[in-house]
Image: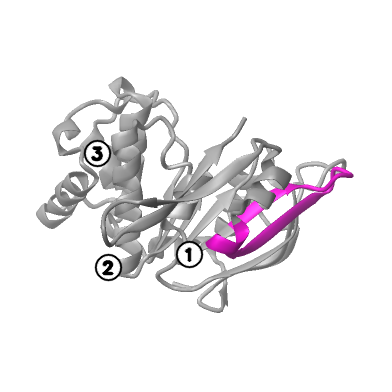
Amino acid sequence: MKVEVRNGHFSYSREEEILKGISFTLPSAQILTILGQNGIGKTTLLKCLLGILPWQQGQTLIDGEQMNYKKHMRRIGYVPQAYKFVFPYCVEDTVMMGLAGNIGLFSIPSRKDRQKVHQTLAEVGIAHLRKRLCSQLSGGQLQLVFMARGLVKDPELMILDEPESHLDYKNQIRVLKMLEKLAKERGISCIINTHYPEHALRISDLTLMQGRTASGEKTYICGPTAKIITEATIRSFFEVESKIITVEKDATTTFKALVVME
């Protein structure tokens, strides 16, 4: 699935424009990471892209067609930030909600639907939580449940808002490897809002970095990750000094890592 945003503008009030002139193109089967400081508008960008919030100027295009929430959400898996469940749904039923558009309002899940849910829970690594109540899960466990719910309908595009939130190192790496696999082996495009530039360096093809100019106006840069995430842009957008180094994992594998110097 190819995704484009053209000249996107959005504000919650007249005093401050949260998103100003955002444009980018994500080709099919690639990963885009969105970076920026807290409160800069990363989650707002995802919601505008999806049509949850309306662009006040500009548009989102899906495979060249203007985004229509009802039509296109069947092909999109959305993983929001983890929040505590008030209602006592079990993990299996919560993930089943991801198939609601396929099952129908007055139908019951079929054996095939349940098998798909179980398969997805195993893929995400939480099959053992199948009967647990979501209200009793940790934030990290709940984040993985939401990921399974977004993935269960075999989307063509995954949009994830801080998917590594609340996760320990092992599960962070599991999620990153899973996203790489989705893009490379299943051709699923991915858009990820993250606080970790090193994760973007590790898996993403493109990066969009949001920030402010010296005068306080919103700005952004977007392009190939290796060109966007540099020591200079980290200094400019995050106001910290950093060093980007090449790490040799083994004789044939290297990757870029970011070390904060402050």
The alpha-carbon separation of the residues under discs 2 and 1 comes to 15 Å
User: What residue is disc 1 on?
Assistant: 205
Give percent across and percent down for residue 27: 49, 73
- Select label 3 or label 2 by which is in front: 2
Decide: marks 2, 1 in contact (CB < 8 A)? no
Compare residues 251 and 121 and report the one nearer the observer.
251
Give percent across and percent down for residue 44: 63, 46
Compare residues 234 and 62 and report the one nearer the observer.
234
Q: Residues within 10 Å of mark 2 (few under 14, many from 20)?
A: few
User: What residue is disc 3 on?
Assistant: 93
The disc labelled 2 sits on which kind of residue?
Glu
Residue extending farthest top? 136
**Whether residue 101 is visible:** no
101 in relation to 196, above or below: below
Give percent across and percent down for residue 74: 39, 62
Q: Which residues are magenta?
A: 208-228
Residue 21 located within the stretch drawn in magenta:
no
Determine whether the residue tagged by mark 2 lies in a helix, strand or loop. Answer: helix
Residue 216 located within the stretch drawn in magenta:
yes
The alpha-carbon separation of the residues under discs 3 and 2 comes to 28 Å
Residue at 61 percent across and 54 percent down: it is 230
The disc labelled 1 sits on which kind of residue?
Asp
Does residue 31 appear left or right of residue 227 in this picture?
left
User: What residue is disc 2 on?
Assistant: 185
208 in relation to 146, above or below: below
8 in relation to 245, above or below: below
Q: Quadrant of residue 239?
A: top right
Q: Earlier in the sequence, mark 2 or mark 1?
A: 2
Residue at 48 percent across and 41 percent down: it is 162
